[in-house]
Image (cartoon, rainbow, N blue to C red):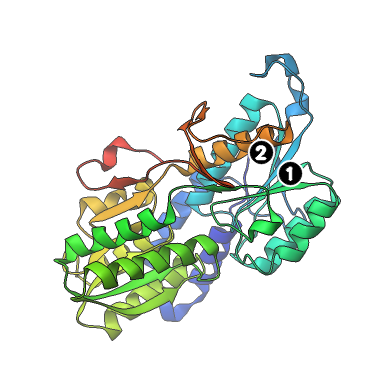
Amino acid sequence: MDCFPVSSFYQYFIVLTCEVVHIKVTLKLLAGFLLIFVVSGCSYWDHTEKYQIIFNGEKKDAQNSESGTKNDFTIAIVPKVSGIPYFNAVEEGALEAGKKLKVTVIFAGPPIADWKQQMNIIEDLVQKDVDLIAVSANDPMMLRPILQKAEQKGIKVITWDSDTTSEQRDLFINMVDPEKLGRHLMDNLASRMGETGDFAIMTGSQDAANLSEWLKWIKVQQKQVYPNMNLIEVVETEDNPQKSYLEAERLLKNYPNLKGILGSSSVGPPAAAQAVKDAGKSGEVVVTGLSTPNLMRTFLKDNSAQIVTLWSPKKLGYLTVSVAKDLLNGQTPKDGQHIKNIGNIKVEGDTVIMGLPIDFTRENIDQYDF
């Protein structure tokens, strides 16, 4: 079995076991992090290695490719952060696409959601002369210079998951329509809260283009449709599981009348649900948002969370590599085009939209495994 980096969770484990003040957090989250460590990989992050090749198409017989032609393309996929389940699933999809489409895939992400570390990784990839870089941007403005440098060297640039400025990339691969998603997330929370009361939002970073756009539409929907609901605070968690838990714990202590928490990045809902459960407020404080079914299964079943929404991150990884290969072959995506293993995509201008999100509840959660 191949060994993949799980640095962020390994670092969180070290921090947790060192902070005596938060020993309660350590005991409750340790088991979950160890499980993720076992499932996601079997070695710690080697800081001497900036990235890994997860599939090298040149080692395979090119005649077995679906197109029947040889491709020597190298495609680099750069997530916001490595090691969390959401991006692990994206990596799995990219790996699968690399094998089936016979291209070299590099998966390279920083151990924390930091634009500076992401920039350093992209700089290294530019020096390696890859054919295409696909990035989920932590900060769209700060990454502009390095992406411009890549394009000047003849490297194609696309974005996925989180966009940068349109001038610095050819295409953006989006999971869902951001307005529909933001409004839908607000609707889910409101329906479980009875359309009244105080709520908080936990996001990864407001600098990330996708999170910022979703947050905008969440707020618009609340103001337009739910005037009896009150947004008391927006918390940035940096996509850090430990920080997410501590922030959720703080919200519950500081706002005794809090009726709901909406997590708009994948680590937020499970951390909030755990904090609600630990506070003995399961069913009393509503938890909704975006996360994977495997992270939320237990919480949905014990009513520490009520509903979560997501698309398939594995399909997102596959789609990104598939579109990248087509682009390198001079083929641009078309509206309604059928992508094998994905389905029909929607294209609006220079944006590819994968499809509709899925809602997970106690009743249907066991139908999904990712």
Position of 221 with respect to 284 (left or right) is right
Residue shown at 26% from the left, 83% from the top: 255
Mark sitting on residue 82: none
Please tell me in which quadrant of the rendered image residue 75 appears.
top right
Coordinates of residue 361 in the picture (x, y in percent): 24, 48
- Kindly identify the amino acid type of the residue bearing the numbered disc 1: Leu
The residue where tag 2 is placed is 324
Q: Secondary structure at mark 1?
A: strand
The image shows residue 64, relative to residue 322, as above or below, that is above
Coordinates of residue 204 in the picture (x, y in percent): 48, 67
- Kindly identify the amino acid type of the residue bearing the numbered disc 2: Ala
The residue where tag 1 is placed is 132
**Mark 2 nearby-residue class (10 Å; few <14, some 14–19, many ≥20):** many
Give the quadrant of the C terminus: top left
Give the quadrant of the N terminus: top right
The furthest residue to the front: 349
